Image (tube, rainbow, N blue to C red):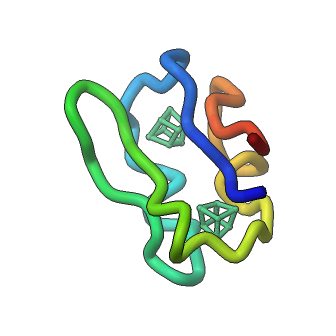
Amino acid sequence: MAYKITDACIACGACADACPVSAISEGDGKYEIDADTCIECGACADTCPVSAPEQA
Ligand code: SF4
Ligand code: SF4
């Protein structure tokens, strides 16, 4: 399953820069992952300072 970003997100943008397929974009108050684009590499979870991306 693709990763999802939880409400713990503080909208720092680090994950969007780390994603190799540009699946992450800024949403309403937090960042969001396009599940169809995500290749489940885990880079966002590794990069996030608050562990907001979780595998669904
Ligand atoms: Fe991007 Fe990888 Fe995170 Fe999916 S798991 S959103 S491909 S960084
Ligand atoms: Fe949100 Fe974490 Fe991504 Fe920063 S790295 S925008 S806190 S999910």
Which is nearer the eye, 53 or 15? 53
Location of the C terminus by quadrant is top right
On the picture, is 54 further left or further right than 21?
Answer: right
Q: Where is residue 22 shown, x and y percent of the image?
A: 44, 76
What is the x, y in percent for residue 52?
63, 29
Q: Is residue 47 left or right of residue 25?
A: right
Q: Residue at x 65, y 39 (%)?
A: 53
Relative image position of residue 37 (x, y in whole percent): 52, 76
Which residue is most to the top?
A: 8
* Left or right: 7, with 46 as reference point: left
Q: Quadrant of residue 11?
A: top left
Q: Against 45, is 40 above or below? A: below
Q: Quadrant of the N terminus?
A: bottom right
**Number of dots carrying numbers:** 0
Query: Hey, which residue is sitting farthest left in the picture?
Result: 28
**x 34%, y 31%: residue:** 30
Q: Return the x and y of residue 32 as percentages of the image width and height.
A: 41, 46
Q: Residue at x 70, y 76 (%)?
A: 39
* Quarter of the render that holds ligand 1: bottom right
Relative vertical location of residue 45 with respect to residue 36 in this rendering, above or below: above
